[in-house]
């Protein structure tokens, strides 16, 4: 039993070391000459624009359902006028960034893991290395930076759609003008509600990109490893998002809200 625990710990520590080396190679290759700007723009299009539909639909449903579920409880205390405020603060502070990041982890991290995994299995990455190209700079740096910049923008679109979904949900059982809903939603919203939540979305994007590229870049030989890389990328990215969010909430509560 102790040998199994020792082997597991050794494997875990080796994995942490490999990931640390992988991240360090990413930072080393950012500032090297011959940066692939065209590939970066292409990845921003694939990661950002191609994920926009599902993110906007998710944001709208999130605001819509949260409003419908909250109204009966608030109405029981005669506080239904506070529903727009509650929905907006909840979405901007926590629900919007986390749910959007998890959606991106399922779509983006799995796609990157499968793409790079298939390239690794078919030895395309090895061919790039032999031909003198820099596979880390071309494949890894561009995808991680695209996730780093695109995920926060996707979160903003999801928040806006959640705001609209909340407005639609409010007017299903009642009647509230757009201006009144806007005033009630943002009357108590402060910069400290938005800024920390927006900052952590960059960390979410970085984690999604790193995990997807790492799992794909280190896929074993064989077609089965492509599916394994995609699945493990989703799981690992989701765990990292939850961990980052827990740490960010604690840091924010200590330095911002206190």
Image (tube, rainbow, N blue to C red):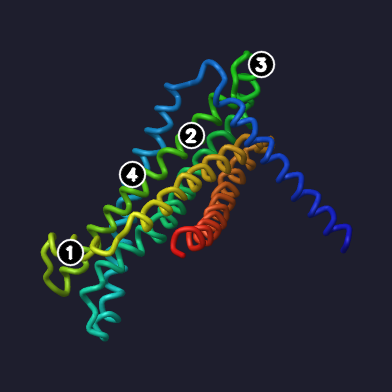
Frontmost of labels 2 and 3 is 2
Up the image or down, 81 lies above or below 236; here it is below
Q: Earlier in the sequence, mark 3 or mark 1?
A: 3
Q: Of callouts 4 and 2, which one flags the residue occurring earlier in the amino acid sequence?
A: 4
In front of the other: 112 or 27? 27
Earlier-in-chain disc, 2 versus 3: 3
Q: Nearer the viewer, residue 203 or 98?
A: 203
Q: CA distance from mark 2 to mark 3?
A: 25 Å
In the rendered image, the vertical position of residue 1 relative to residue 198, given as above or below:
below
Residue that badge 2 annotates = 145
The residue indicated by pointer 3 is 130
For the residue labelled by badge 2, is the local secondary structure a helix, a strand or a loop? helix
Residue highlighted by disc 1: 181
Which mark is in front, 4 or 3? 4
- Could you tell me how far apart the alpha carbons at marks 4 and 3 are, in whole angstroms? 37 Å
**Residue at coordinates 68% horizontally, 40% vertically from top-left?**
20
Q: Earlier in the sequence, mark 2 or mark 1?
A: 2
Residue at 37% from the left image edge and 58% from the top image edge: 193
Q: Residue 146, which numbered label?
A: none
């Amino acid at each position: 039993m102790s040998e199994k625990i020792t082997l597991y710990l050794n494997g875990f520590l080796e994995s942490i070391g490999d990931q640390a080396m992988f991240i360090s190679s990413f930072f080393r290759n950012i500032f090297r000459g011959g940066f692939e700007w065209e590939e970066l723009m292409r990845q921003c299009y694939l990661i950002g624009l191609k994920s926009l539909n599902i993110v906007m639909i998710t944001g709208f449903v999130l605001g819509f359902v949260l409003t419908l579920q909250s109204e009966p409880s608030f109405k029981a205390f005669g506080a239904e006028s506070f529903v727009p405020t509650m929905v907006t603060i909840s979405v901007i502070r926590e629900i919007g960034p986390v749910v959007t990041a998890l959606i991106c982890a399922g779509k983006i991290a799995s796609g990157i893991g499968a793409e790079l995994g298939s390239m690794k299995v078919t030895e395309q990455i090895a061919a790039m290395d032999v031909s003198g190209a820099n596979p880390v700079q071309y494949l890894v740096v561009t995808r991680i930076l695209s996730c780093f910049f695109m995920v926060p923008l996707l979160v903003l679109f999801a928040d806006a759609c959640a705001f609209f979904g909340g407005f639609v949900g409010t007017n299903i059982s009642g009647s509230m003008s757009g201006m009144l809903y806007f005033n009630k939603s943002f009357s108590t919203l402060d910069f400290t509600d938005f800024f920390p939540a927006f900052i952590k979305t960059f960390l979410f994007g970085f984690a999604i990109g790193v995990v997807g590229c790492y799992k794909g870049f280190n896929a074993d030989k064989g077609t089965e490893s492509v599916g394994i890389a995609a699945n493990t990328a989703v799981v690992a990215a989701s765990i990292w998002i939850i961990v980052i969010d827990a740490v960010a909430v604690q840091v924010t509560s200590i330095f911002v809200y206190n």
